[in-house]
Amino acid sequence: MSEVSLKHIKKIYPYTEPKKKGEAARPTNLKITDEGVVAVEDFNLDIADREFVVLVGPSGCGKSTTLRMVAGLEEISGGELYIDGRLVNDVAPKDRDIAMVFQSYALYPHMTVRENMAFPLKLKKVDQATINAKVNEAAEILGITEYLERKPKNLSGGQRQRVAIGRAIVREPKVLLMDEPLSNLDAKLRNQMRAEIIKLRQRINTTFIYVTHDQTEAMTLGDRIVIMKDGVVQQIGTPQEVFDHPANLFVSGFIGVPQMNYFNARLVKKGEGSYEVELDGKTVSVSPDKQARLAANGVESQDITLGVRPEHVALFGEESGMFHGTVEVSEMMGSSVHLHLSSLGQNVIVIVQTMDLQGQHKEGFKIGQEVAYTFGGNVIHMFSKEDERNLELPR
């Protein structure tokens, strides 16, 4: 079993004032206290045995720092870290039964692939027969058997990353930590390696904690994803949960490509448990399930930020629909077109499929063309102007 539990974990770095007169302090969005700069604040997460958890967020949000605290490469400033029920705050990295795959591969250039993969086992003084068996098994799982006698310089980036992963899994660690392992690869290789990692986790009995800034990796790899901003966890949930029910404005904008459309609107409570949204003088009826959640939270009439994902906006003929816009940019994406409309004094993105249900290509859109669009009350997201939280979710 390899459960991991982080309880009220925090990381504080010393804060130093500018050394020279007139020198500006390093800008940061992190909280600064009397103790220093809070890089990770009150992080709580229970990870089940063999679960694949992804920490995702923009640069500087604290995700890699959190991973390094689990690895023992960063000292924990506060809170408790448990692996298999054992408190490991003060346990050396080599004694935590974890392995880590870094962004930079970190392979020994003078060693062959086989020697690189065998190295951690040799350090543990494992017998040669066992080493050979484990290396061969890992190489077969990762599809790199034919490269075992090559040096890293003779491998592609994707092959080197497979070797780095192989070196980690031969140890059969309880927890496998991966810190942006695909960020150095091109788009095609990233797609291939994502698929390889998905297959890998089915074949080894290990708990994965994976760090990335790429939401596509987070959504495709994770059983659950942890979205962070400025050292604070914003939401924890399955990929579908955070896509369908983002906790706040930040999560809604971070998850989903292209980004969600936002409008300044007003939520109106019409009666007991009845709501509608007013936008540009028009009314959008809120779906019954969303009305029930708003009512359960005691939400009153208020100005809101209304969110609608581009894939949930429907186009109509020029005289139909509720809202009108002018096509400013048309991005051909193959199976769909991303239209950027000038509408309601802002940019509105709409995703339009290029084929109809009969497999026929639809007529394209021209720059300057006037279009009409609408969206249903079942796909809207309503965020508080005061604290940016999703009004449908409990506080």
Image: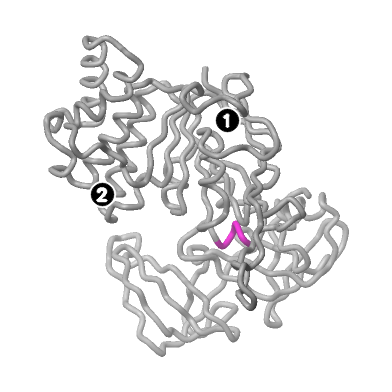
Above or below: residue 242 compared with residue 260: above
- What secondary structure is marked by label 2? helix
> Residue 182, how many percent across, how many down?
34, 47
Q: Residue at x 31, y 12 (%)?
A: 126
Label 1 neighbour load within 10 Å: few <14, some 14-19, many 20+: some
Q: Quadrant of residue 197?
A: top left
Gap in angstroms between the C-alphas marked 2 and 1? 29 Å
**Mark sitting on residue 294:** none
**Which secondary structure class fits the magenta region best?**
helix
Q: Residue at x 29, y 65 (%)?
A: 334
Above or below: residue 72 compared with residue 256: above
215 displayed left or right of 138: right
The segment highlighted magenta reads 249-253
Q: Residue at x 32, y 13 (%)?
A: 125
**Mark sitting on residue 47:** 1
Q: Is residue 234 visible?
A: no
Q: Residue at x 59, y 78 (%)?
A: 322
- To which residue does mark 2 refer? 189
Q: Quadrant of residue 16?
A: bottom right
| Residue 68 magenta | no
